């Protein structure tokens, strides 16, 4: 059995992530998805909780029939031991998929095979772009799977993002 690992913040999970994971699933029997910065939420760059991101991923991928594990992973501010931390928190995996230079380097230094897949329309399919569109009231729903829209609607995610993006200056007269 071949098991692959892919990590991201998924703030939110979007069609770029979805497309990449579908491609990974063609080469692997199971995909271990690391939800990075799991301790962060209710911030402009990280509005969604780890549990909400698990829901986004689970619902988006179950429709595609992709066998996966979504594992929340808190940040560890020590790169020299980061790979060991990841390995201790996830099911075993044979290959890592990433384009993040630090992630690639750390796993390669640990002797783990790393594949660098092509990115999918990186300019549009980015969490930053989606969050900006949410804040501006522009179309963001075309950039995420339908299941993710449902989760964000369920948790009132757009209004949360708008709320946490305000500063105390917004409340001064």
Image: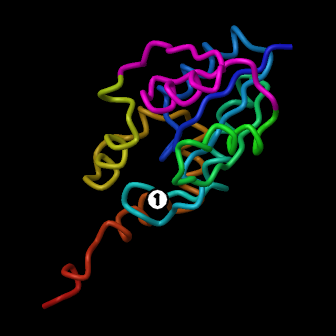
Q: Residue at x 76, y 45 (%)?
A: 89
Q: Which quadrant would residue 110 be assigned to in this image?
A: top right
Q: Residue at x 56, y 42 (%)?
A: 80
**SS at badge 1:** loop
Q: Nearer the viewer, residue 152 or 4?
A: 4
Q: Residue at x 60, y 43 (%)?
A: 82
Question: Where is residue 14 drawn, in percent x and y?
Answer: 49, 34
Q: Is residue 37 left or right of residue 88?
A: left
Q: Residue furthest top?
A: 27
Q: Is residue 70 left or right of residue 158?
A: right
Q: Residues within 10 Å of mark 1 (few under 14, many from 20)?
A: many
Q: How many marks?
A: 1
Residue 155 higher or lower than 14, as above or below:
below
Residue 61 higher or lower than 44, as above or below:
above
| Snapshot colouring | rainbow
Question: Where is residue 15 drawn, in percent x and y?
Answer: 49, 28
Question: Where is residue 102 drawn, in percent x and y?
Answer: 45, 32
Q: Residue at x 50, y 15 (%)?
A: 116
Residue 111 inside the magenta-drawn segment: yes
Question: Where is residue 49 drawn, in percent x and y?
Answer: 58, 59
Which quarter of the rendering shows the N terminus?
top right
Q: Residue furthest right?
A: 1
Residue 159 higher or lower than 32, as above or below:
below
Residue 116 inside the magenta-drawn segment: yes
Which quarter of the rendering shows the C terminus?
bottom left
Q: Tell me where the magenta segment starts and ends, as one range.
A: 92-121
Residue carrying label 1: 47
Q: Residue furthest bottom?
A: 173
Q: Is residue 134 left or right of residue 117?
A: left
Q: Nearer the viewer, residue 1 or 157?
A: 1
């Amino acid at each position: 059995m071949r098991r692959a690992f892919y990590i991201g913040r998924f703030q939110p999970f979007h069609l770029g992530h979805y497309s990449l994971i579908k491609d990974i699933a063609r080469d692997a029997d199971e995909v271990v998805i690391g939800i990075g910065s799991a301790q962060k939420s209710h911030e402009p760059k990280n509005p969604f909780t780890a549990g909400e991101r698990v829901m986004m991923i689970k619902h988006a991928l179950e429709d595609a029939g992709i066998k996966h594990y979504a594992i929340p992973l808190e940040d560890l501010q020590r790169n020299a031991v980061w790979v060991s931390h990841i390995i201790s928190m996830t099911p075993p995996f044979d290959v890592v998929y990433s384009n993040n230079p630090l992630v690639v380097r750390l796993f390669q230094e640990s002797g783990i095979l790393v594949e660098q897949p092509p990115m999918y329309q990186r300019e549009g399919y980015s969490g930053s772009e989606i969050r900006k569109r949410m804040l501006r009231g522009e179309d963001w729903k075309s950039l995420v799977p339908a299941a993710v829209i449902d989760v964000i609607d369920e948790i009132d995610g757009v209004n949360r993002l708008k709320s946490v993006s305000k500063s105390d200056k917004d409340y001064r007269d």
